[in-house]
Structure formats: C-alpha cells, structure tokens
C-alpha cells in the first residue's frame, strides 16, 4: 500500500458544474406562506447558474449563434458523479415524483405520513429513510385542518424539520423564487411536497396540452435536479378507467413523460379501508403495494408488496474491490496498482479509476463506500472508505496524516 503521508483527500468534480457554498442561515419564521421578499432569506449559491438561465429564459433571451456543449466518451468516464441518496429507499427518490388519486381517496394523509417520517428520520413501512427538512405546501388546507390531521395521525410530538405553507405562487408567478428563498434558510431540505399540482399551475382557459404539461413538470424537475431534492406533487386521476393505470393521471402523457416517477392510489370503493398503490420510476423497479387504513390514526399501513424482478448486476471484479472495505477495515488508500494487487480484481490498471468513476454512485448507495481519487507529483491515488465517527469528526483531513508536497487537481481524462 502506498505511503499515506503522501496522499490527501481531493474530491473530483465535473468542470463547469455548480458547487454549493451551503452555509446555513437563520431565516425569519413564517408558517403561513413562503417568503416572497428578497430581504427575508437568501438563495442558495449553488443554483446561481440555474437562476441565470431562468432569468434569460424569462427575458426571452436567445443567443445569436447557439452552440452545443459536448463531452466525449473518454471525458465522460473520467468524471465521478456523487450520487444522491434516496429519500425513502426503494420508494421515493430525488427528482419529480407524482402521487395521483381520486379526490378524497387519502392522498393528503399519505403525503402527510411521508413528510412526518422523513422529517423525523423514522423508517417508513420498514424502508430506510434519509432524514431531512421537509416543506409541505398544503395549498388546499388551512392551519386548523392541518393541526387536526397531523395530531390524529401522530399525536402532539412535533419537529422543527417539518414546515407547512398554505399559500404559494404559481410556477410562472413566483413559486421558484419562493422555493429558492426557502432552501437558502433550510439547506438540509431533501423533500418538498406540493398538494396539489393544480394549485401551482398557471391558470389558463385553453385546457391541457402535452407541451403545457411537459413544461410544468420540466420546470419543477429542473429545480429539483439543481438542488438535489425530491418534489412530490399530488395530482388527480380521471374518472374513466384505463388498461394502464398510469393513463388515469389527469392531463396528458406529458406529466408522466417528464416526471421521474409516479404513484397512483386507488380503491375499489370510496368507503373501503383497503387501497392499492402502484409505483413506477426511473430509479427503482415497478411495484404494487397493498395498503390498509388504520381506523384510529388514519395512517396507511402496508400489508403486502409485489415488486418486479429488478436487480442491478455488479461486476464480479468490482465486488473484489468492494470486499476490501469491511467493518473492521473501513478505509483503503493507495495507488491503482496497489488496489489491483490487493483486491485481485482483473481490471487493467489504466481503467481502474474510470471503472470506479462509473460506479461511484452504486458504491455509495448500495455499499456505503465513498470513493475519491487524485494525483500527487509522484503518482495517482485512490481512497475508498465508509463513513465512521472517526471520519466524521476529522473532515479536515479525513484521517490522513499529511499533505503531499505537490498535489495537483483531481485528474481528468486518463
């Protein structure tokens, strides 16, 4: 193994991608609506590029000679993209997700349940939760109804990590700015719930169109992706039955086509306590959950789960590297040659960093293994590690004993 005194933590980033400054500030408290005044709170600096593009779009700016920004395949493999953990494992992921159902079928109770579990960090139906601040735009409710609903479901144990707003702008009239301001004061937010989608759409007498529906979801998705959060939008279904349950989502196919995933909550009869939740998404297998309503708390409980056979295959050679990191040995540091020799992986040494770059999100989300690499004046280095209390308490050097005499920036194309 290479001398750790000559190695240091240097995380690879993609040239040109925004990097967040992420300093938390103390916002003014406003439980009724989201701040609209620029003096109330500060936007996240990591979305400056996104904001600049938004301003240009709203101003009707069109470059005289638009050009494409391209990346060749070799360069693409040289980037290590840090994955964003699921909000609820195997259930809710970052991006835009739609929850659709008939009126009064229990959608608001379900999203209230999701909001509470994420804000409290409590497993949801046995699934692991990534705790974070949650903003719930309850745009069809008032505070009295919210108080009654949440106390019936969870008692009076509260949390400062779950915020409610009962008023908000539309997507074309202030919502994005309001959400930017909110995130400026709540940088640990990972979930925003919009109940309902119709309340933030532009009022129009022209009805639904594919282009209009796609644009609405596209704007929300652009915001969610820029901030690495999930936006869960509650929506309605049509009265007409359909062979494909997702075709029952009100509006055009532009909604599902642009969204990252959708859930449809259905009942055989409105008075039933049993329901079915069908789920489709880009980052998870298709699922069907059978739910039953707790008549005392009005919470939904899962009684059965049908999951499409779906498992990402891990290269056996990569698994040899994964097996180097254990509870007893949570960290490995060395050169690519060291890694090949110690793991026994049959991977060309000049391909090892590209292999790890491509699989960095999988390493983190599936095996909780962090990966970083860089280059000293002497050689390239790789660090693999699991988060431990020791690592967390020593972020300044992540357990390394020294800094290399001549450390270059993380390497780009090999």
Image (cartoon, rainbow, N blue to C red):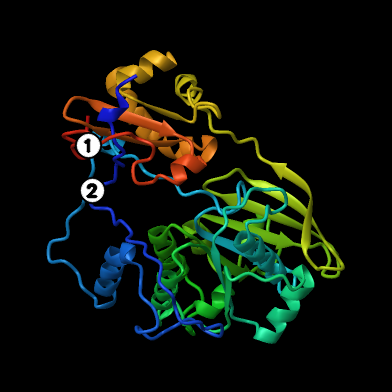
Residue 345 appears anywhere in the view: no
Residue designated by label 1: 412
The quarter of the image holding the N terminus is: top left
Pick whichever, 302 or 129, lies toward us: 129
Residue at position x 66%, y 39% in the image: 308
Residue 377 place in picture, x, y as percent:
16, 29
How many labels sit on residues?
Answer: 2
Q: Considering only vertical position in the picture, is 378 above or below 125?
A: above
Residue 146 place in picture, x, y as percent:
69, 79
Pick whichever, 189 or 278, lies toward us: 189
Residue designated by label 2: 15
The quarter of the image holding the C terminus is: top left
Q: Quadrant of residue 156?
A: bottom right
Does the residue at mark 2 contact the one at mark 1 (Cβ under 8 Å)?
yes
Distance in Å between CA atoms under marks 2 and 1 = 9 Å
Residue at position x 38%, y 34% in the image: 358
- The local crowd at label 2, few if under 14, some if 14 to 19, many if 20 or more residues have their Cα within 10 Å, is few
Say whether residue 149 is left or right of residue 45. right
Say whether residue 15 is left or right of residue 162. left
Pick whichever, 169 or 288, lies toward us: 169
Q: Earlier in the sequence, mark 2 or mark 1?
A: 2
Residue 204 image label: none
Q: Considering only vertical position in the picture, is 374 above or below 193?
A: above
Residue at position x 53%, y 27% in the image: 326
Q: Quadrant of residue 154?
A: bottom right
Q: Considering only vertical position in the picture, is 204 above or below 120?
A: below
SS assignment at label 2 = loop
- The local crowd at label 1, few if under 14, some if 14 to 19, many if 20 or more residues have their Cα within 10 Å, is some
Residue at position x 31%, y 42% in the image: 11
């Amino acid at each position: 193994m290479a001398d750790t005194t000559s190695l240091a933590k240097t995380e690879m980033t993609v040239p040109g991608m925004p990097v967040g400054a992420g300093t938390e500030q103390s916002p003014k408290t406003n439980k009724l609506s989201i701040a609209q005044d620029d003096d109330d709170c500060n936007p996240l600096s990591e979305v400056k590029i996104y904001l600049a593009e938004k301003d240009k779009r709203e101003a009707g700016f069109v470059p005289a000679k638009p050009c494409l920004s391209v990346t060749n395949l070799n360069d693409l493999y040289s980037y290590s993209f840090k994955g964003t953990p699921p909000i609820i494992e195997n259930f809710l992921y970052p991006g835009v997700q739609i929850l659709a159902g008939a009126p009064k079928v229990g959608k608001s109770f379900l999203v209230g349940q999701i909001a509470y579990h994420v804000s409290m960090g409590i497993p949801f139906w046995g699934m692991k939760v990534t705790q974070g601040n949650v903003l719930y735009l309850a745009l069809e409710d008032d505070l009295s109804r919210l108080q009654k609903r949440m106390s019936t479901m969870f008692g009076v144990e509260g949390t400062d990590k779950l915020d409610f707003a009962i008023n908000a702008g539309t997507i074309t009239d202030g919502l994005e700015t309001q959400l930017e301001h909110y995130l400026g004061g709540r940088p640990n937010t990972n979930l925003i719930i919009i109940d309902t989608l119709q309340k933030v759409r532009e009022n129009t007498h022209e009805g639904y169109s594919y282009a209009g529906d796609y644009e609405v979801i596209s704007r929300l998705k652009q915001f969610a992706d820029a901030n690495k959060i999930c936006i869960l939008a509650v929506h309605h279904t049509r009265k007409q039955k359909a062979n494909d349950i997702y075709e029952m989502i009100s509006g055009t196919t532009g909604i599902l086509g642009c969204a990252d995933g959708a859930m449809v909550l259905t009942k055989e009869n409105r008075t039933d306590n049993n329901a079915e939740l069908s789920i489709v998404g880009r980052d998870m297998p298709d699922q069907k959950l059978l739910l039953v309503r707790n008549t005392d708390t009005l919470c939904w409980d899962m009684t059965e789960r049908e999951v499409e056979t779906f498992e990402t295959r891990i290269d056996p050679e990569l698994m040899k590297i994964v097996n180097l990191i254990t509870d007893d040995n949570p960290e490995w540091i060395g050169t690519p040659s060291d890694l090949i020799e110690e793991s026994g992986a049959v991977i060309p040494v000049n391909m090892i960093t590209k292999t790890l770059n491509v699989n960095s999100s999988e390493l983190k989300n599936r095996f909780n293994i962090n990966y970083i690499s860089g280059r000293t004046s002497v050689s390239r280095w790789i660090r693999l590690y699991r988060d431990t209390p020791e690592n967390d308490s020593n972020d300044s050097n992540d357990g390394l004993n020294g800094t290399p005499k001549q450390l270059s920036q993380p390497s780009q194309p090999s």
